[in-house]
Amino acid sequence: MHEKTLSSKTVFDGRLLKLDVLDVELDSGLRAVREVVRHPGACVVLPRLPDGRFVLVRQFRKPVEHELIEVVAGVMKSGEDPADCADRELREETGFKATGLYSMGVAYSSPGYCDEQLHFFYAQLSSEQESPNPEDDEKLEVIFLSAERIEKMISEGEIVDAKTVVAWQLYQRSEVRGQKSERGRMGG
């Protein structure tokens, strides 16, 4: 299966996103229009302290008009390595440094209309925390949760952010789950 792009027009080019409208031709010869959000990609980090607690953040999300509990995540800068982005976002949002950073995989957030690629990482943390330094327009609360609490919050609909649920599921199925807090880094 394939769709041949016949033409493409950028109708919006913002600070973060770009919106292209494409005329495409399907294998059957039928023509269709596709609206595609272009996104630079992001890293997603599930951080864990040596005592076993996980570090997440709570923040208000304007598109859904709610505070959400989420894993650490951030947009990659042009040409930035996903693991470097994960390290940067972890320090900025939580004040913690990774002693080990392990790739858990890659996924598309909403491939029906967006090309955003998410790079998922598990981070083992040092126990020392510096002051978080989020972007000027971000207001974050760092929270600490046990594995049992995260499971309950997902089951009861308290954690509804998709990247957080996916990160948790990847972690549950990952070989990094049994890792002791040792120095290590595996990029994406």
Image (cartoon, rainbow, N blue to C red):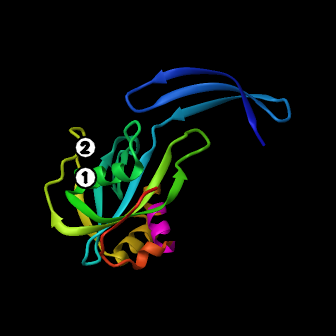
The magenta stretch spans which residues?
166-173
The kind of secondary structure the magenta stretch mainly shows is helix
Seen in the image, is 5 located left or right of residue 166? right
Q: Which residue is more in the foreground, 20 or 182?
A: 182
Q: Which amino acid type is marked by label 2?
A: Glu
Tell me what residue is drawn at x 38 percent, y 77 percent: 179
Q: Secondary structure at mark 1?
A: helix
Q: Residue furthest right?
A: 28
Quadrant containing the N terminus is top right
Q: Magenta stretch containing residue 171, yes or no?
A: yes
Quadrant position of residue 111: top right
Report the residue marked by disc 2: 138
Q: Secondary structure at mark 2?
A: loop
Q: Is residue 159 visible?
A: no
Quadrant position of residue 127: bottom left
Tell me what residue is drawn at x 22 percent, y 56 percent: 141
Q: Which amino acid type is marked by label 1?
A: Glu
Residue 22: percent from the left, percent from the top? 65, 26
Mark 1: give few (<14), some (14-19) or many (20+) Cα within 10 Å. Answer: many
Residue 186: percent from the left, percent from the top? 41, 62
Please tell me the numbered disc located at residue 8.
none
Mark 2: give few (<14), some (14-19) or many (20+) Cα within 10 Å. Answer: few
Please tell me the numbered disc located at residue 93.
1
Nearer mark to the viewer, of 1 and 2: 1
Residue 182: percent from the left, percent from the top? 30, 74
Q: Magenta stretch containing residue 178, yes or no?
A: no
Tell me what residue is drawn at x 30 percent, y 54 percent: 87
Q: Which residue is more in the foreground, 46 or 165?
A: 46
Relative to 72, say whether 5 is above or below.
above
Seen in the image, is 165 located left or right of residue 141? right
Q: CA distance from mark 1 to mark 2?
A: 9 Å
